[in-house]
Structures are given as structure tokens and as C-alpha cells.
Image: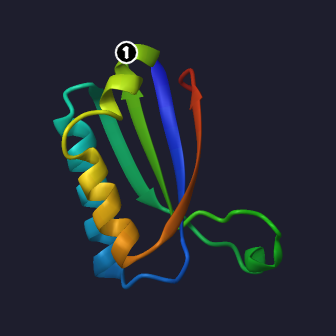
Amino acid sequence: MITHTMMVSFERPLPASELDQYLADIERVMLDTGFAQSVAARRHIPVPGEEAIPALIATAIVQVAVADIEALAKAFTAPGLHEVIDHWQSRHPYRVAWANHEPLA
């Protein structure tokens, strides 16, 4: 099993309802690919003073579990995924850092 962990950092703060919709859209579209065994998306929990750290600070974390690296590659070419990404990028620009790894627990 491979876990794809994405750290999503929006350029500007989003209203709570918008962030909730983004997370729901990403979860749905990843599950709809048929390649994800599970998807979990959560908000980042801020710590006072972290904005002073010169690093990418996530707005949210998304984890997608897939069977193997081939399934992950296929998931990212599935219909609908890039439409959802483009929709959100055009409305609320964001950056993403990610890591593909074995399950941590």
C-alpha cells in the first residue's frame, strides 16, 4: 500500500465553508477515480507563532491510500480530477507539497 500525503497551502485564508467544500470536493473526486482505497482530508491546526517560520504551512492535509504506485499514477490521470483542481486553483490559488510513502502506522 502507498499513502499519498498532500499538504495544501492556500495563498489567502478561505472562509470556513469554502475550505470545507474544497476538502469535500477533493475527497469525492479521489474516491471517484476508483483507485483510492481511502481518502482523509483535515484542516491544519495552527500553533501560535508558526507564521514566522519560513516554511510552507499547510491549510489542510489530504491523505489518499492506494494499492501501489501504478494505482496512484492512474488516479492522477482519472477524468474529473484536474477539473476539480483547476476550479479551485482559479478561485483560490494554492500550493501543494506531497510525499508518497508506506503507511506510517
Q: Is 46 in front, or is 15?
A: 15
Residue at x 39%, y 52% (from the top left corner): 41
| Colour scheme of the picture | rainbow
Q: Position of residue 32 (x, y in %)?
A: 17, 38
Q: Position of residue 102 (x, y in %)?
A: 56, 20
Indicate the quadrant where residue 42 lies: bottom left
Residue at x 47%, y 72% (from the top left corner): 93
Q: Position of residue 54 (x, y in %)?
A: 82, 69
- In which quadrant is the C terminus drawn? top right
Q: Is 91 in front, or is 7?
A: 91
82 up-or-down from 37: above or below = below
Residue at x 19%, y 39% (from the top left corner): 79
Residue at x 46%, y 17% (from the top left corner): 69
Give left or right: position of 76 versus 81.
Answer: right
Q: Is 49 in front, or is 5?
A: 5
- The amino acid pointed to by label 1 is Ala
Element type where label 1 sits in the image: loop
- Residue 68 visible somewhere in the drawing: no
11 up-or-down from 36: above or below = below
- In which quadrant is the N terminus drawn? top left
Q: According to the image, label 1 marks what residue?
A: 67
Indicate the quadrant where residue 75 lies: top left
Instruction: Give the number of marks.
Output: 1
Give left or right: position of 16 versus 45.
Answer: left
Q: Label 1: few (<14), some or many (≥20) within 10 Å?
A: few
Q: Position of residue 65 (x, y in %)?
A: 39, 28
